[in-house]
Amino acid sequence: MADAKQVTVRQTGSPIRREKDQRATLAGLGLNKLGRVSTLEDTPSVRGMIRKVAHLLEIVE
């Protein structure tokens, strides 16, 4: 498990006036304000969450 891949995302869009499920997805990723950065384990479920709100995020290298 030492080789666990990680993905870092930064929130670039506001959750205001977004669908309830998109706001919940942002909260699930550990984001809720502009500029917040979250480092997560790179799993298929996390990738799906990122894809759902990709218009509100950027992936940090």
Image (cartoon, rainbow, N blue to C red):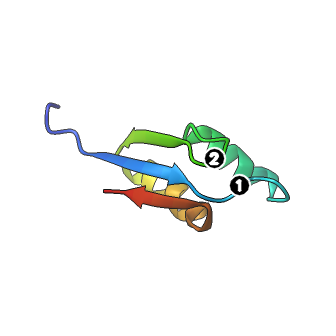
State the residue position of label 2: 26
53 left or right, relative to 61: right
Closer to the camera, 38 or 50? 38
Q: Are marks 2 and 1 in contact (CB under 8 Å)?
A: yes
Residue depicted at 60% across the width and 68% down the height: 55
Q: Amino acid at mark 2?
A: Leu
Disc 2: CA contacts within 10 A as few (<14), some (14-19) or many (>=20): many
Q: Is residue 42 visible?
A: no
Helix, strand or loop at label 2? It is helix
**Farthest residue in the left direction?**
2
User: From what the image shows, is residue 9 above or below residue 39?
Assistant: below
What is the quadrant of residue 60 in the picture?
bottom left
22 left or right, relative to 38: right
Helix, strand or loop at label 1? It is helix
Give x and y (percent) for residue 6: 30, 44
Which dot marks residue 2? none
Closer to the camera, 47 or 18? 18
Closer to the camera, 44 or 7? 7
State the residue position of label 1: 22
Q: CA distance from mark 2 to mark 1?
A: 6 Å
23 left or right, relative to 26: right
**Farthest residue in the front direction?**
35
